Structures are given as C-alpha cells and as structure tokens.
Image: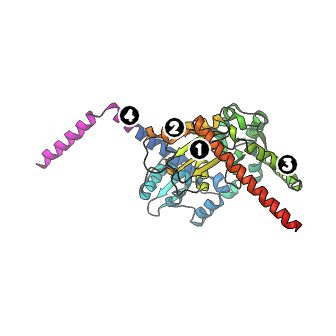
Amino acid sequence: MEENDDNSETKSLLNIKRNRTEDDKVNIYKKKKKRKNRKKLLKNKLEFFLSDINLYHDTYLKNIYLSNNSSISPEIFLTFNSIKDLLKDIKNDSDRKNVIIKAIEISHKLIYNKTTNQIRRIHPYQENLINPELYDKCTIFIQNLPPIIINHDIIYDLFKEYKILYIQLIKGKNHFYTGEAFITLKNIEDVENIINRFNNSIPKLISELNPKVLKPLKIMTKEEYLKNKIIDIGNSNKDTSEKKIAENKNNDNIDEHFLIKINHIKVNLSLNYIKKFLEKIVIPQYIDINKNEKSMILRFDSKKTSDFFLSKLKEKNYENIKDILEGPIKNENFKNIIYELTEKERKEYLNLVKKKIENFKEKKESSKNMKESQKKE
C-alpha cells in the first residue's frame, strides 16, 4: 500500500510539472534568477564591508571586527540598511541569516565558521598595509554632482573605465547629499586621467538625467581640496546674507515645480524617515504631507527629475516605495496611487501653498513690527 501511495504522489508531481503554463515557467525562472543575483550582490557587499579600504574608513565596523578576534557574526550585517533592502522580502531573521551564509559560501575572500557562528576574512586585515599619504594622493574630490539623483551606481557608471576602490558621498546637516564626493582610485594615473577628462565638464550620463540643476563638475585631488578648505576657513567671516536671499528667491518659484501625489501613505511616518527613504530613489525639492488624507505631494524642480522618479518606481515594480504605503497594493493599482497632478489639481494645490506662504510672511512681519514698537516704548 505504501509503495502505491508513493507512486501516486510522484505521478501527481510529474503531472503538475507537465501542466505548468509558460507563465509559471517564466515566474520560476525569474525567482531563481533573483535568488542568484541576490546571492552575488550580497557576496559583493559583504566582501566590501570587510575589505581593507572599508575597514580603514569604517571605524565602527573595524572596532567590532578587531575586538572579536578578527571575526564578526552574520547578525551584525542584518542591521545594515543596504542588507535589509536586499532581504526585505524575507520575514524571518534566521532565514535572512541563512541567505547571508549561502552568499559567503561562493566568496573567495570570506569564510563562515558554523561552530562559532562567525565570519572571517581568509587573508587577515592589516591596517599598516594602507599608506595614508599614497591613499590621499589616489583620492579625488568632486563638486557640483546633482544632489537630487546622485548615488553610488551613477558614479560607478560614470567612471566605469577606472578602478574605483571607495566612494564617499557627502551629506549635509539635513541628511541629504550635498553634491560632493570623495572617490579613491587604484592608482595615481587614474586620478590624473579623470581630472583631465571630466574637470569643468558636464558628462553626458548626468546631463541626460537632470540637466536643469547641473553645473560643470569641479574635480581636484584631495590634497588640493584640503588646501582650499584652509583658505575657506580663513575667509569664513564674510557676510553671506545676499547669497541666502538669492537662494530663498529661487526656492519661491513654485509655479515651475513638477508635482507628484502619493496616496495611501502610513500616517505614523515622520518627515525625516520619508526623506531618508526617498533618498534611495530621488530626493524631491519639497515634501508636503497631508496626514488627514493619508497622502503627500512631492515637488520636483524639473520635469526630467519627476519622470526619472516615476521611471525608477516602475523599473522596480514599485517595490522600492511599498514600505511607506498602507496595506498590500496590487501593481495595476499604482496608477491611481502615484501620479502627476492634473492641471486643475496643480492650480488648486499651488494656490493653497501660496496662501500659506503669504500668511507666514504676514505673521512674521507683524511680529517684527510688534518687537520694534516694544523697543520704542
């Protein structure tokens, strides 16, 4: 009886395989490919995190690694945002950990010990292998990168002909990218070639993404940057009020902004969280949240930037925005959830914003007059 049962089970499984549609086969293939690609991405990220160049920079990770006999537990990596993004579809921590372990199995630089539950480098880390003077000579400083769209992938694509060891995108006090970066290259020749080729130019790759806010790139060696910084500190007492006024004037041109509305957002999210979240895609110029309607409007300074934002969402099947939305949403419904405002909606919204700005200015002016009258008394 048992043998017959086993035979019937195997036959039913065979029938299921035979009856699979083409769509089923494509979905299975895509899932396998996704797992394979994720494993490679994880491997590359883990190798980078524990590389000489990253440990040289990342004192937090280096201290954990060295204080634990030059090893680190997989659970530490589960707290990293980039690892979380890669494993966000896996709900169980133990399953996430297993995916990390499988990624290490295909690595030639890292090894995992089951008994100690620790990850080690195959070749031990030696800090003195990096010469700080030579390292600084191989590092360039770049200004005028478009802060709204810039990310590590774009820089790798921009300088794909050169061997990049490390990228540090600089953030301001608001946690947004400033459009500045330090890039460490493998040799001094690459430093000279990049400066000669890209300094005072607007690369085609970047101009295609967001030409409205672009300026020619300024590229210099780290040594030059440090010299200029010393000079800037000496001149830091100069009055910059005119510059601030000019910047505020540019920000008031709301009629030129391109507006995208996102519905069904989670009410409990803070503005800072949303800013950091959108940073991974494209940073809008303004974010207006309406908690009563569970919606927000993103203001972009150019049509290309707003189109780029929408294209990035479609490219990822909206997976990169679902974390800030309420409830499970089918992909076909996203056209009603994330969209560019119609001309009528746009006028209504801009009029409302302008009224708010006027009210704010009036309140500010009245409080200023009150203070002046109090001083006279």
Q: Quadrant of residue 213?
A: top right
Image position of 15 (left or right of 98): left
Of labels 4 and 1, earlier in sequence is 4
Q: Which residues are magenta?
A: 1-29
Question: Where is 263 relative to 308, above or below?
Answer: below
Alpha-carbon span between mark 2 and mark 1: 12 Å
Alpha-carbon span between mark 3 and mark 4: 60 Å
Alpha-carbon span between mark 4 and mark 2: 20 Å
Let me know if residue 4 appears in the view. yes
Q: Which residue is mark 4?
A: 26
**Tag 2 near tag 1, CB within 8 Å:** no
Q: Which residue is mark 1?
A: 281
Q: Which mark is residue 242?
A: 3
Image position of 242 (left or right of 337): right
Q: Secondary structure at mark 2?
A: helix
Of labels 2 and 1, earlier in sequence is 1
The spot of residue 201 in percent (x, y) is 77, 33
Q: Which residue is mark 2?
A: 314
Q: Secondary structure at mark 1?
A: loop
Image position of 117 (left or right of 137): left
Residue at 34% in and 31% down: 22
* Camera-nearest label, 4 or 2: 2
Q: Which mark is residue 92?
A: none
Q: Secondary structure at mark 3?
A: helix
* Camera-nearest label, 1 or 3: 3
Alpha-carbon span between mark 1 and mark 3: 33 Å
* Camera-nearest label, 3 or 4: 3
- Which amino acid, mark 3? Glu
Q: Nearer the viewer, residue 143 or 120?
A: 143
